[in-house]
Image (spheres, coloured by chain):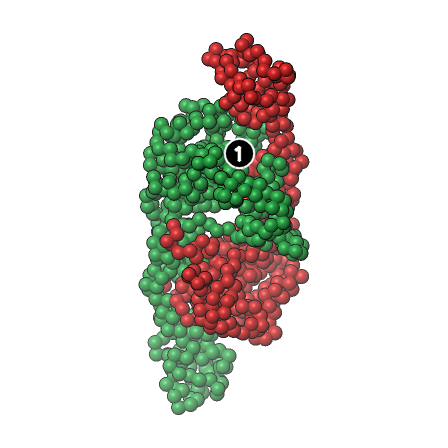
Chain colours: A green, B red
Amino acid sequence: MQGFPSAEQALADFFRAWEPKEQVELVPIDEAAWRVTAGTLYSENTLPVARISACDGIAVCSDRFADGAPDISKWRIGTDFVRADTGDDFEDRFDAVIAIEEVDLTEDGGISFISPDVEVEPGSNVRERGDSFWKGDLLIGENLPIRPTDLAALAMGGVTMVPVRKKPRAAFIPTGSELIPPQMRPKRGQNVDTNSLMAKHMLLGMGADPLLFPIVPDAKAELGNALDQALGESDIVIINAGSARGDEDFNARLLEQKGKLIHHYIAAAPGRPLALAVVNGKPVVNLPGPTMAAFFGLDWCVRAIINRYLRIPMPKRQRIQGKLMEDMHSTPHMAILCRMDVVKTANGYECYPRSFHSESLPLCMGTNAMYVSPIGESARDKGELIEVELLRGEEYLEGADGL
Amino acid sequence: MQGFPSAEQALADFFRAWEPKEQVELVPIDEAAWRVTAGTLYSENTLPVARISACDGIAVCSDRFADGAPDISKWRIGTDFVRADTGDDFEDRFDAVIAIEEVDLTEDGGISFISPDVEVEPGSNVRERGDSFWKGDLLIGENLPIRPTDLAALAMGGVTMVPVRKKPRAAFIPTGSELIPPQMRPKRGQNVDTNSLMAKHMLLGMGADPLLFPIVPDAKAELGNALDQALGESDIVIINAGSARGDEDFNARLLEQKGKLIHHYIAAAPGRPLALAVVNGKPVVNLPGPTMAAFFGLDWCVRAIINRYLRIPMPKRQRIQGKLMEDMHSTPHMAILCRMDVVKTANGYECYPRSFHSESLPLCMGTNAMYVSPIGESARDKGELIEVELLRGEEYLEGADGL
């Protein structure tokens, strides 16, 4: 087992053999949420377009206040002043706004009172053209997921068709004659295809466009057909399992025949027999079948490929430090994923390893954290402080009583 | 301004006046991703259903190995042994599996060799019924968002119609005669409705079901009609602005007439004039109009109401400590949102406040972090270390060169 490349090395080798083409599309602003910008975007608008009132009030000519309080007894609305509330435009002959709290308006369109304390100068309570921003101002940089506040910035700036990175289409081919869809009850010798559903929603979360294939039985010709179809329809192909029929190199040989096998077997477990290939210029990942192995391979390998398409960095999850509550053994020549349950106590966080060997598998799938042992590390002792990645937000470590 | 309740106090008062009804629905497993569980869910399945092979190999009767290596010269496939690969069921008369690497099979259905080192005992290389999990095992707890790995656990366990909290339907009513949709170019006196789009995608992210109303002009009757329609169609109503026509209490009075106004003006800025009411047993939030004020109100107030519906805790964003690069003034009797740009340097993180008063508004909307000054804090000095909440993942602080 020694001599297999690390996940990092395998990806570095893979990315030397394959570079994604730049694929950009324009989408309407309402469909741009969480898409990745394919360029730096600048405002087409200047706001306010013209000066506006900065408060609810009346617009006046400031020069009539130059020598102190004017005689307002004959002032008429529309002639000597106009109503101008927050954000309102008003005629160019007016140049200042007096707040509504400072005046008493009469029912017949006059004014009975202006506070003697009010200061009226050119531009009082007026927001100038461009006070919010100018045409040409930066709205958002390149290669950034578009958050709701960024949508607001794009809308302000009049960018309503947004250039974004095309979502890579990711075909997922579940293989195994023993597999049945989740809607069926498993009989003797059958197993549930859990990975299509998991992969679909992981891929959606990564910003890819998943294309789920039906279950392909363990037959060389059928797998070959599915692979050809998937290569025709997608930007990346994920074959899940398919090496279970007594011939571990079944898929690897198929990938070698059809393209270039970059690596088979990676020093990352569960899921060590993962294969990375380039076929017809497209990435093909052969992901091991067990659910935890498929999760890990999607997380470190498929995500890296999709992020390369989208030109975004790999996520850094929230991390906490906690006390390891059981001895944890790993294999120094492999990175090993260990699912963890983190519990908040009066003395800090406690971390319980949940092995997929010894525990109920759903318990292992459901943990709120995980730990990946770095290559070279052989064991961590009970009682040690370790740093784990959170798989739920930190707020879920608080316990239900906080709600 | 002193005497207004804090955001926490306002919400506490509001939640004394209003409790959501429990609303649960069953959704198919493929639609359950990121929904919130409305109950603790247990497995309906036991897997493996019956014992299976733990490796690729042949299934045999272990008792024939009890006295050492048996004579295999006359062994026939289907009689003395069968093929049994990983996950395969096999006939009950066999009780052990020998790995395929340890045997040589002949083309005519016999065996020419079994490694003399192989140990064959009852259960060798066999996974027992229930080895992965049993019917009745925990799949996922209550009030938890369903992640892709949780979907896999539910699929394994045969829970394919999933009880989840109903998404609260959130009506959003943008008001203001000056507003135009983002697709139009603003003319003098016009402003772009940025908040509908921002609110829609923030609400989607919170797990609500947004119902966007068209822009309602500043007219009491039209607003009243929209509010009535919204109350009829949704679980929570958000009125955005609508107090801009010279009468700050226009909406507050409408809410008082129709229901119970819990608070108007909160010690949280921008967006101090926020109003919280209960009308027809439903929450109504009057959110101030400016984009940053609307963002803050959605983030602290609307999110708290939606999370109460969904019975999930408020999120704890990733936080980093960085050096404040400018003096920052705040008002001790208010919590003040300050958008921040965090930059990673060789000496650690640097935090640049981006005021919505002094900077280009889109720059302020686009920051990667924010800071909310606690009530009681009046200023933070340049050079101080402050803890800020990240609005993009920590990986986006790394700079583009890492990719």
Of A387 and A67, nearer the camera is A387
Q: Is residue A388 above or below residue A236?
A: below
According to the picture, the residue beneath numbered tag 1 turns out to be: A290
Residue B231 quadrant: bottom right
Expressed as whole percent of the image width and height from the top left, the position of residue B63 reads 64, 16
SS at circle 1: loop
Q: Amino acid at mark 1?
A: Pro
Expressed as whole percent of the image width and height from the top left, the position of residue B323 reads 47, 66
Extreme residue in the bottom direction: A67
Extreme residue in the top direction: B74
Of A366 and A323, nearer the camera is A323
Q: Is residue B124 above or below residue A126?
A: above
Expressed as whole percent of the image width and height from the top left, the position of residue B12 reads 64, 63
Of B215 and A121, nearer the camera is A121
Q: Residue at x 56, y 21 (%)?
A: B117
Q: Chain of mark 1?
A: A
